Image (tube, helix red, strand yellow):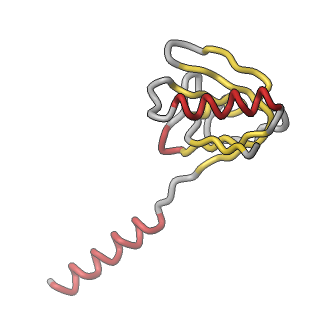
Amino acid sequence: MKKTFLILVSIVSSMMAQSAFSHVLETGKVTRIYPAGTYVVTFKLDGADNTTLCPLGAQWTLETTDGLFKEKYSLILTAMSLGKTVTFMHHDQLGCGNGNTNKIYSVDFAP
C-alpha cells in the first residue's frame, strides 16, 4: 500500500512539473489604439504577427479591469509618442481577449 502511494505521488508530481503555460511575445511599434468594446482598449503593432494562441493575435487588448491597467496603458502611450518599440506578452492561462485577441499580460518598454 505504501509503495503504491509513493508511485502515485511520483506520477502526479512529474505530471505537474511538466505542465507549463505557454506564452507569446511580440515586439514592435504601436501603430493603432482604439476602443473595442466596454472597458477594452485594443492595440496593433507594426511588423509580422508571430502569435498563434488567439485567432486575432495581431491585435492586443488591455482591459480596464486589469489591476495594472493605468501603468500598462501609460507605458504603451509613452512608447507610441516617442516612436519606441514595446514588447507585449500574453499567457495562454489568461484566455483570449475581446474578439479573440491576445490579452496583454505584461508590457516591456526601454526608453
Instruction: Pick the quarter of the image with the N terminus.
Output: bottom left
Nearer to us in this view, 66 or 4: 66
Q: Residue lying farthest left?
A: 1
Q: Relative to 45, does residue 7 appear above or below in the rendering? A: below
| Quarter assignment of residue 88 | top right
Q: Residue lying farthest bottom?
A: 3
Tally of numbered tags: 0
Q: Residue at x 70, y 43 (%)?
A: 109
Q: Position of residue 111 (x, y in %)?
A: 76, 43
Nearer to us in this view, 70 or 57: 70
Q: Relative to 39, does residue 70 appear above or below in the rendering? A: below
Q: Residue at x 78, y 37 (%)?
A: 49
Q: Is residue 14 left or right of residue 75?
A: left
| Quarter assignment of residue 90 | top right
Q: Residue at x 51, y 54 (%)?
A: 21
Q: Position of residue 95 (x, y in %)?
A: 50, 37
Q: Residue at x 69, y 27 (%)?
A: 77
Q: Position of residue 8 (x, y in %)?
A: 28, 75
Q: Position of residue 25 (x, y in %)?
A: 68, 46
Q: Is residue 60 left or right of residue 18?
A: right
